[in-house]
Amino acid sequence: MEGRDSQAIAELARLQRSAGATYIDVNAGMFFDDEAEILAWLVRTVQGAVDAPVAIDSPNPAAIKAALEAVESGKPTGTPAGTPTGTPTGTPAKKPIINSITDEKKRFDAVLPLVLEHGAGVVALCMDDAGMPETVADRVAIADRLFAKLTGEGVSPGDIYFDPMVRPVGTGSHYGVVAIETIREVKRRHPDAHIMCGLSNISFGIPARKLMNQAFLVAAMAAGMDGAILDPLDKKLMAILYAAEALLGIDDFCMGYISKFREGALDA
């Protein structure tokens, strides 16, 4: 990113897309002074390389705005809002996702207009002005407030992606249970919304992180999670994901699982 190596970024996006990524997550947060410009460049580069929409990952409203404008300027003339560059004619449009909004007043007020103006999906973190809550009950209460506020402004439930705020299990043995039970209760209360998380947050600071990520993925999916920021180039993780979809009744007659087997995607 620092060297603006478009070829390297495009190739990584193509690898992630071909490995099963539904969205390509773009994040330039390490470039504090140039984040907006680099994030917009990332969006243009990814849109030129793959037919997947982007998830714009930033706490900075100015950077999110620049990235959203890059999404729209990169679409062919006449295509519906949310259609990524390179999407073949007839392919259903997919809108970008903004990651993220919280129930912190300043952040909510800054990000909501971007969600509404651009018709984007939005990740809603279970966090407010008091910080990151410790209990399931507090996280669910924040999710309830965010759901009411977002839908009250016209955001569709299906465009909301609740993030339970996964904390490293190595820093508290209860954090895995807190995340899983938050997912379960938020999904029960808001079945038309999505649940997602940064998968590897659970394993930060402990050995054999991939193993912990794999185990957490299955447990979280069983509780109702239907999205995750993860590494699609981890073949074993993706194979476990496809198997979990079949076991949880998400994959009708295991056709997706069988298809991936025939493609060699389960040879992890």
Image: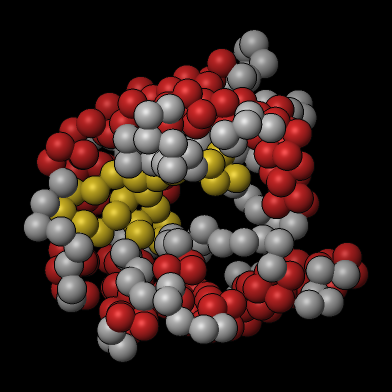
Q: Is residue 251 visible?
A: yes
Residue sitting at the far front: 3
Residue 48 point in image, percent of width and height: 71, 28
Quadrant of residue 24 within the rendered picture: top right
Residue 223 point in image, percent of width and height: 42, 77
Residue drawn at x 48%, y 39% as measured from the top left: 28
Instruction: Name the image quarter holding the C terminus.
Output: bottom right
Residue drawn at x 63%, y 29% as measured from the top left: 4
Viewed as shown, does residue 264 lie left or right of 44?
right
Residue 227 point in image, percent of width and height: 51, 60
Viewed as shown, does residue 41 lie left or right of 49?
left
Residue drawn at x 33%, y 26% as measured from the top left: 62
Residue sitting at the far bottom: 173
Q: Which is nearer the eye, 46 or 76?
A: 46
Residue 79 point in image, percent of width and height: 63, 19
Q: Which is nearer the eye, 146 or 268?
A: 268
Residue drawn at x 9%, y 57% as measured from the top left: 130
Instruction: Name the image quarter holding the N terminus.
Output: top right
Q: Which is nearer the eye, 79 or 124?
A: 124
Q: How is colour applied across the structure in the image?
A: secondary structure
Viewed as shown, does residue 265 lie left or right of 86?
right
Q: Is residue 56 visible?
A: no
Quadrant of residue 264 within the rendered picture: bottom right
Q: How many marks?
A: 0
Look at the picture and state if 65 lies above or below 213: above
Look at the picture and state if 8 lies above or below 141: above
Look at the picture and state if 72 lies above or below 169: above
Viewed as shown, does residue 238 lie left or right of 164?
right
Residue sitting at the far left: 130
